[in-house]
Image: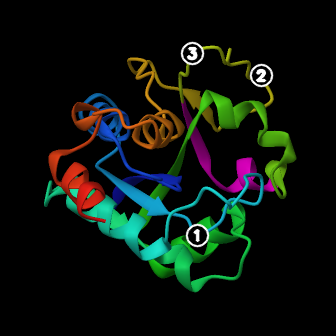
């Protein structure tokens, strides 16, 4: 039975912060693999800035570049929209019953977690790993035993920063995996 860290996100685009965090998780926690779950639509985010689903999936796949402990998944592409995390976790657990899934989210998402669909049920069924983000203190009540804060380094890089920098004509190639940089420049 493998322990899978399910790391959902728009990955708009995937950058070195995503990869470094996932690398830290597979090397310094009990997680065997991290699956990057490319999400078509986050119900709590504006879809206007979202790059094409297939392009974001392609960027994620070239970013992991056959690293054996990372997988990229389009699992949510075949699910109803908007994408609700609990429904996705239930469906992925059903599809892969021999794995134990742990949801990986940032401290920024944890602060809005109570606005998610059925957060209590999600915490009852699945464990959540929270990674630190600058400016987002993490508070967990003692009534949430399935929630764990990982002591990962803070990677203060965001996809928003990357998109804004590219739009301003900045050369941010070293914030991105090389193959992602080339895909973006060719598009």
* Foreground of the two, 169 or 14: 169
- Position in image of residue 182 (x %, y %): 19, 55
The quadrant holding residue 54 is: bottom left
* Alpha carbon distance from label 2 to label 1: 33 Å
Farthest residue, direction front? 169
Asked if marks 3 and 2 touch (Cβ < 8 Å), the reply is no
Q: Which residue is mark 3?
A: 134
- Position in image of residue 168 (x %, y %): 45, 36
Q: Earlier in the sequence, mark 3 or mark 2?
A: 3
Q: Which residue is mark 2?
A: 142
Residue 69 in sight here: no
Camera-near label (3 vs 2) is: 3
Q: Which residue is mark 1?
A: 40
Q: Residues within 10 Å of mark 1 (few under 14, many from 20)?
A: many
* Foreground of the two, 128 or 138: 138
Element marked by disc 1? loop
The N terminus lies in quadrant: bottom left
Using residue 79 as the reference point, say whether residue 180 is left or right of it. left
Residue at 34%, 35% in the rendered image:
25
Q: How many numbered marks are there?
A: 3
Residue at 70%, 82% in the rendered image:
80
Q: Earlier in the sequence, mark 1 or mark 3?
A: 1
Q: Residues within 10 Å of mark 2 (few under 14, many from 20)?
A: few
Start-end of magenta stretch = 121-130
Per the image, is 124 magenta?
yes
Residue at 72%, 47% in the rendered image:
123
Element marked by disc 3? loop
The quadrant holding residue 70 is: bottom left
- Position in image of residue 4 (x %, y %): 39, 54
Asked if marks 2 and 1 touch (Cβ < 8 Å), the reply is no
Q: Earlier in the sequence, mark 2 or mark 1?
A: 1
């Amino acid at each position: 039975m493998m322990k899978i860290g399910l790391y959902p996100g728009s990955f708009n685009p995937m950058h070195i912060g995503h990869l470094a965090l996932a690398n830290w998780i597979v090397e310094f926690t009990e997680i065997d693999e991290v699956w990057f779950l490319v999400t078509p639509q986050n119900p709590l985010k504006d879809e206007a800035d979202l790059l094409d689903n297939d392009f974001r999936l392609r960027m994620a796949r070239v970013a992991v570049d056959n690293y054996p402990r990372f997988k990229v998944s389009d699992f949510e592409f075949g699910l109803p929209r908007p994408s609700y995390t609990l429904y996705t976790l239930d469906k992925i657990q059903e599809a892969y019953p021999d794995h134990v899934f742990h949801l990986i989210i940032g401290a920024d998402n944890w602060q809005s977690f109570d606005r998610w669909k059925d957060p209590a049920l999600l915490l009852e069924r699945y464990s959540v790993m929270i990674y630190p983000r600058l400016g987002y203190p993490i508070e967990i009540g003692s009534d949430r035993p399935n929630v764990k804060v990982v002591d990962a380094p803070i990677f203060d890089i965001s996809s928003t920063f990357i998109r804004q920098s590219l739009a301003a004509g900045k050369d941010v190639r070293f914030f991105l995996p090389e193959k992602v940089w080339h895909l973006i420049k060719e598009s």
